[in-house]
Amino acid sequence: MGSTLKHVAAGMVLSSLAALTPARSTTNVPTTDNMHWVDAWTASPDSAGPPLGTRTIRQVIRTSIGGSSVRIRFSNLFGTAPLTIGPVHMAQHASGSAIRPETDHAVTFRGKPTVTIAKGGDALSDPIPLSVAPLEELAVSMYLPIRTGSSTLHTVGNQTAFMTLTGDATAMTQFHTGETTSSRIFLTDVEVAAGSNAQTIAVIGDSITDGVGSTQDKNARWPDALAARLQANPALRSIAIVDAGMAGNRILHDGATPFLGPSALARLDRDVLNKPGVHWVLVMEGINDISATDVLATPDGNVSAQQIIDGMKTMIGRAHAKGIKIYGVTLTPYGGVDWPFTSAAGEAKRQAVNAWIRHAGAFDAVIDFDQVVRDPAHTGSLLAAFDSGDHLHPNDAGYKAMAAAIDLRLFTRDR
């Protein structure tokens, strides 16, 4: 078994196929005319996975905002051959691998039940006439009728996806046999048709934004907690949030084990600025640029605090060029993480970057997560009550505290 296959297979365990249920008709599929689309969920592609044989994959997502219709995007970014997907179905999620069959809809692409995506490309579905509520879990089921080339993954999904071993099970209510994985596969976006005042917050970050350390299947990442806060405020329920966090991500350089994915600078447009409805960007990146100096014995691993700051300045300029507000988030402590990930020199860089974020006035606003989660007695370390156990990633309580500390007025001043 190759190393990439091991990477995905490690997250697979036996899971729970019941009666076939008919899909709702899509005869009256709405058109996109006069529909205001915003991105309501995302998972940024970060790596190539193994080829996959003919099978059905069911993935569960949670919308951050409600809408009258939805559409979904698949990516073949890391593919080595054209990718064929279909049939595809979407329904409300019940529990485990089960859907609510009365909500099941067949998905089309330019009116057809299948789509072929060129390597490196992506495909957006037709609008699906499924009304969704904010914070509602939906299940996207896709059949792979032809063996794929390399798959496109978002490695740390933190959400169970269900896979049959063979065959089209997209319309089945539940999978009784098969495998599971915690990675996202091919699925990158869910958009909703919302009111004309709907807007999106896009968060770009690393594993802390991706939710490492939070409880699987509980939507306990800090962007999830922020989405819940927005929906609890009647004046802010038209604001969606999408999590473009990527475990191991760096601002300045692409992935090099153990760092994953295209750099934040390389993916900023695709994963953030070009998403429909984006009005604000939150940036929490840089800790992996710092730690790479100690982990990687290569020239591109050795970056200074000023280089990280210059990378942030570039992100600010690109956001402002599109008329998008961009807020800086301070880097949280990581004292106690096993060497070589942390060092005195690395901590000095973190402090320098945080001082610039706080005081330079380059960002449109500052969100100080460092102050929220650090131990007051040991400011280079996480507070024990917020530590998931690895001294780098917060736990559910830590992520909730981070979201609770965000001033929601940041999203009302220019609306």
Image: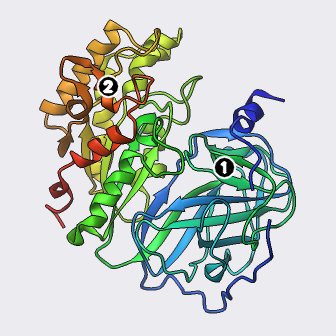
Left or right of 301 on screen, residue 148: right
Give amino acid for label 1: Gly
Q: Position of residue 82 (x, y in %)?
A: 77, 54
Residue displayed at 59% across by 63% down: 73
- In which quadrant is the N terminus drawn? top right
Q: Position of residue 318 (x, y in %)?
A: 33, 46
Q: Are marks 1 and 2 in contact (CB under 8 Å)?
A: no
- Which numbered disc covers residue 384? 2
Q: Position of residue 164 (x, y in %)?
A: 80, 56
* Residue 311 in which image quadrant: top left
Left or right of 45 on screen, residue 391: left
Mark 2 surroundings: few (<14), some (14-19) or many (≥20) residues within 10 A: some
Instruction: Label 1, secondary structure: give it.
Output: loop
Query: Which residue in the protein does label 1 denote?
Result: 120
Give amino acid for label 2: Ala
Can you see residue 371? yes
